């Protein structure tokens, strides 16, 4: 485990998570290499969102360990005990883990530019002028240079999601987590978001994407992880998942979604 | 289909739109105007007020002092109440059962007893509980304060404490409602970019809660400005106390009540203006 742990971008080592008596993640082990694009598929309630939220410690796990670039997330290991890190230490870890949400979650009271600047300014303490320049660059990259002074409520869903992507990029994360980034969008708007994510994939970002959008999984993901009821059922190259799904559940899933 | 076809075919023709008259509303307006007019006429006929007396006292030194005292007391009490309210609200949503319980108890007590009783209590109980206030910087010999409690707890201090503590309970509930109204996703996003809990509060939760807190807070400010009149019961020289003092010697009751009422209206206008400015600063988005 140890050498691969250092080399991998994200490692989930026998992770379990329960809400009360209900086990949502069951002994999940996954490893993602730097630059790899992995899609997380599975029916509703499989635990995809929960898994992503555990990686940046928005949810705490009940057992196992999570590493991002070799660093144990959320805890310090002393002897055989895990001590939960302080608020400050956890937030420092989250800086290098970008997260994009299904419902965008742009800060409503801030303009688009302020949203993209919020990480650098409040978290990294970058001078405002510098942060604004960086933010304008990123808005250019996601194709929205003219929306800088708008408020999120004045943008379409697809535009909001691209701003949200720019907001996470502003912290130069080493890993990007996407939780159904296109599920709240109609097909046309989802196209532009998919295009943005694809360009990130081409730039070599390490990404873990929970999605129902087969275009992402089929066209540019390296790997598919298929989950059902909190368990990883398949963890295979994207191509083979669609051509030769091994399990009954994945066959049904592919038949229904890829038809 | 046939409707669309016939419409397209018809000659373009100017159409007059006649809106329905809202009879009820007009009738009610008429009744209210009539009753108000009758009351005014009755008041003027009875010469209930001497306008000259009203004007003299309106800007008299004593009355101005009272108005100033009321404004200062009300404003400081609101500031104190906001700080208390924020702390109590944060305790309530902290998730710690003891803090939440303490917070709920605080709100229950201070919202559940009349403000007047609270003012009288602080004014009388504090000097009894502590004969002498003695405040030093710990581990040094520096004495910050050393005086008999009765000289420190003046009517003003007791009134400020009483109003601030009581109002703090209302502000706590208002602020809590504001915090709860902020979408969970906003907090998750703020944490995900690496903000500490304090930063999440400061940069995301409070600014968004503000647009809910401000209108209700403005309302409380106005109530508080008027509640300063309760402080007359413990001998604080605020507006109403001064007005009653004057009319008990010259018997110009209506004039002086009108003077006081007018100044309360001025203060209310001031509070409303501040509220409007703040609402523009934190607009609904
Ligand atoms: N806070 C919570 N308390 C209790 N149960 C929860 C909580 N959050 C999620 N769950 C449960 O955990 C399970 C997994 O939820 P999760 O949101 O991770 O699924 P998902 O795969 O993302 O589904 P979807 O495709 O609908 O988004 C569900 O059964 C859900 O009911
Ligand atoms: Mg989900």
Image (tube, rainbow, N blue to C red):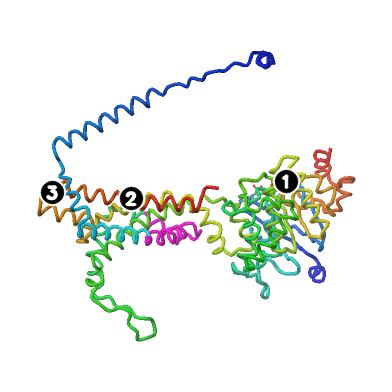
View extreme (bottom): residue: B141
Seen from the viewer's position, the closer of residues A91 and B280 is B280
Side (left or right) of B53 relative to B27: left
Q: In the visual, does B111 lie left or right of B64?
A: right
A188 vs A224: above or below: above
* Pointer 2 residue: B268
Give the quadrant of residue A16.
bottom right
Q: Is residue B106 magenta?
A: yes
Q: Which residue corresponds to the image point at 64% horizontal and 59% vertical from the top-left? A: A58
Q: Secondary structure at mark 2?
A: helix
Residue at the spot 53% in from the left edge and 56% down from the top edge = B205
Q: In which quadrant of the rendered image does the N terminus of chain A lie?
A: bottom right
* Quadrant in the picture for residue A65: bottom right
Q: Is residue A249 above or below residue A148?
A: above
Q: To which chain does the residue with label 1 belong? A: A
Residue A9 location in percent, x, y? 78, 64
Please state the extent of the stretch shown in magenta in the rendering.
B79-107
Q: Gap between marks 3 and 1, in whole Å? A: 74 Å
Q: Which residue is mark 1?
A: A182
Q: Residues within 10 Å of mark 3 (few under 14, many from 20)?
A: some
Disc 2: host chain: B
Residues at discs 1 and 2 both on one chain: no
**One can see residue A3 in this view:** yes
SS of the residue at dot 3? loop
Residue A20 in view here: no
Asked if the residue under mark 1 is in contact with the one under mark 3, i.e. CB atoms within 8 Å, the reply is: no
Write down the residue under mark 3. B252
Disc 3: which chain? Answer: B
């Amino acid at each position: 485990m140890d050498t691969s742990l250092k080399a991998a971008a994200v490692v989930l080592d026998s992770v379990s998570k329960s809400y009360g008596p209900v086990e949502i993640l069951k002994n999940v082990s996954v490893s993602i290499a730097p630059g790899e694009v992995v899609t997380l598929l599975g029916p509703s309630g499989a635990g995809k969102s929960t898994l992503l939220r555990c990686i940046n410690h928005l949810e705490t796990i009940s057992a196992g360990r999570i590493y991002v670039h070799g660093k144990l997330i959320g805890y310090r290991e002393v002897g055989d005990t895990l001590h939960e890190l302080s608020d400050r230490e956890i937030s420092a870890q989250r800086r290098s883990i970008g997260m994009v949400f299904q419902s965008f979650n742009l800060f409503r009271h801030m303009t688009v530019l302020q949203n993209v600047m919020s990480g650098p300014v409040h978290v990294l303490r970058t001078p405002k002028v510098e942060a604004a320049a960086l933010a304008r660059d990123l808005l250019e990259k996601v194709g929205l240079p003219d929306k800088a002074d708008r408020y999120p409520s004045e943008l379409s869903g697809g535009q909001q999601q691209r701003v949200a992507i720019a907001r996470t990029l502003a912290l130069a994360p080493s890993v990007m987590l996407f939780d159904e980034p296109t599920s709240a969008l109609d097909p046309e708007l989802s196209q532009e978001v998919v295009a943005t994510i694809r360009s990130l994939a081409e730039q070599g970002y390490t990404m873990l994407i929970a999605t129902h959008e087969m275009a992402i999984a089929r066209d540019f993901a390296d790997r598919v992880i298929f989950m059902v009821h909190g368990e990883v059922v398949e963890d295979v190259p994207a191509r083979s998942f669609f051509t030769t799904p091994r399990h009954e559940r994945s066959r049904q899933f592919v038949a229904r979604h890829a038809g | 289909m046939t409707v669309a076809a016939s419409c397209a075919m018809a000659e373009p023709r100017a159409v007059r739109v006649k809106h329905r008259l809202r009879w009820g509303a007009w009738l009610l307006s008429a009744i209210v105007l009539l009753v108000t007019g009758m009351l005014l006429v009755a008041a003027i006929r009875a010469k209930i007020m001497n306008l000259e007396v009203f004007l003299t006292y309106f800007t008299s030194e004593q009355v101005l002092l009272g108005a100033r005292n009321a404004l200062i007391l009300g404003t400081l009490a609101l500031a104190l109440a906001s700080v208390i309210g924020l702390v109590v609200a944060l305790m309530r949503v902290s998730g710690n059962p003891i803090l939440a319980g303490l917070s709920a108890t605080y709100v229950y007590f201070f919202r559940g007893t009349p403000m007047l009783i609270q003012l009288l209590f602080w004014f009388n109980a504090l000097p009894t509980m502590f004969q002498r206030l003695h405040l030093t910087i710990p581990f040094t010999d520096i004495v910050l304060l050393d005086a008999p409690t009765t000289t420190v707890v003046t009517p003003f201090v007791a009134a400020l404490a009483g109003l601030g503590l009581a109002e703090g309970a209302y502000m706590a509930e208002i602020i809590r409602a504001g915090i709860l109204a902020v979408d969970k996703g906003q907090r998750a996003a703020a944490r995900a970019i690496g903000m500490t809990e304090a930063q999440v509060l400061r940069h995301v939760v409070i600014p968004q809660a503000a647009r809910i807190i401000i209108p209700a807070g403005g309302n409380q400010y106005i109530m508080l400005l008027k509640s300063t009149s309760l402080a007359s019961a413990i001998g604080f020289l605020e507006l109403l106390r001064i007005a009653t003092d004057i009319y008990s010697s010259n018997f110009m009751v209506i004039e002086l009540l009108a003077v006081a009422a007018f100044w309360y209206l001025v203060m209310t206008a001031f509070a409303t203006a501040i509220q409007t400015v703040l609402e523009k600063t934190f607009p609904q988005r």
